[in-house]
Amino acid sequence: MVKGKFRLVGGLAALSLVLSGLITYYVNPQWQDTGFFISGLGLFSILLFVLDYYGLFSHPLVKKIDNIFKDRETALDDVTKIGLTAYLVALLYVLVRYNLRIMPDQIILLGVFAAALMGRTRKFLSDWLPFTVLIFAYDSMRGVSDNIGFPINYQPLINLERFFFLGNLPTIELQKIFYTPGLTQWYDVIAMNVYFLHFTPAVLFAAFLWASKGKDFTKFRDSMLLVSYAALVTFMLFPASPPWMAHDMGFIKEDLYRIRLEIETDYLPTTINTIYYLATSNTVAAMPSLHAAYPWLVFLYARKRWGVKGYAFIPLPLSIGLAAVYLGEHYVIDICAGFIYATAAHYFSNRLK
């Protein structure tokens, strides 16, 4: 049954790669090489599934190799636990000391290392690899969704924001109080780093759920996929400008700064790019805010798992949302939309058998 589920999700992941590669190739001429690579990876994955279906992996030699890598789920001895803890502490020190940021595929590599220590490598790959591929496909398609042809929305978001805040824009009001152009405050640096905490804590929380061997992992994983692709459809149909872009295009007349660009040269975490660098970005994917949606999912599942104690996680989405508004990256309504999308994904994922 597990193998059947793996084939189903893995096949979906492979088809998503082919689709995202084709979209990337034909929609944005500047990223044709990326599109070709992504589609090729998807086709290669489909080929592997076809070979598996026709039993070409049933050769005795393949079975012997397969037996070597079977999961041997045993409790970790004390020496291994100490070594794993020391490694994680050293890794955290290096990340902080050299201001490094880990890409999603690098997080998965670390997960493979941890799963190997626990004797659950195959289980980890079957649960996580299709998920990682689908997120990669989402990021690739998100990067070209603004080239589909729908007009970028500037004024509707501004009008809605001013309606709810009595004619004011929270981004401008926060920057009036806290931001001094040309002078970087300590809380500016904190806000920028908090802003980038939308994805990694969600993956770490998913890793915790997976290690706990409960059903919540698959539901949380499916919720992340559901909210990502629901947002992707919205990005395609309703390209939405963030506040800083609306200001640059003249739709917002008051002073408004994209603080992240003002200070990122000196303070932005350095990224060691791997294959995930091929996924392109989209500057008009502001509504809904996935910076708010992913950590809100963490809060919802923490509350589901621990009840009232789960409210200890609510500062995560709220602080990320506040940072996004202050930095000029999102409107408050973008943040609220992210919360709504995440809540809907949580609701539907927990009602699927």
Image (tube, rainbow, N blue to C red):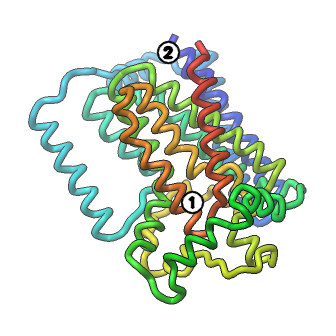
Residue 2 is tagged as 2
Tell me the amino acid under the disc marked 2: Val
Residue 23 is tagged as none
Spot occupied by residue 213 in the image (x, y as percentages of width and height): 36, 22
Badge 2 marks a residue whose secondary structure is helix
Spot occupied by residue 78 in the image (x, y as percentages of width and height): 10, 33
**Foreground pick, 210 / 316:** 316
Q: CA distance from mark 1 to mark 2?
A: 31 Å
**Foreground pick, 189 / 315:** 315
Any part of residue 122 in sight: no
Tell me the amino acid under the disc marked 1: Tyr
Q: Residue at x 32, y 41 (%)?
A: 113
**Foreground pick, 199 / 148:** 199
In the image, residue 75 sits, relative to residue 18, either above or below, namely above
| Figure quadrant of residue 161 | bottom right
Q: Is residue 250 left or right of residue 3?
A: right
Labels 1 and 2: the sequence-earlier one: 2
Q: Residue at x 81, y 78 (%)?
A: 250
Q: Residue at x 42, y 61 (%)?
A: 101
**What residue sits right under mark 1 in the picture?**
277
Any part of residue 178 in sight: yes
Quadrant in the picture for the C terminus:
top right
Spot occupied by residue 317 in the image (x, y as percentages of width and height): 49, 48
Spot occupied by residue 185 in the image (x, y as percentages of width and height): 41, 79
In the image, residue 285 sits, relative to residue 117, either above or below, namely below
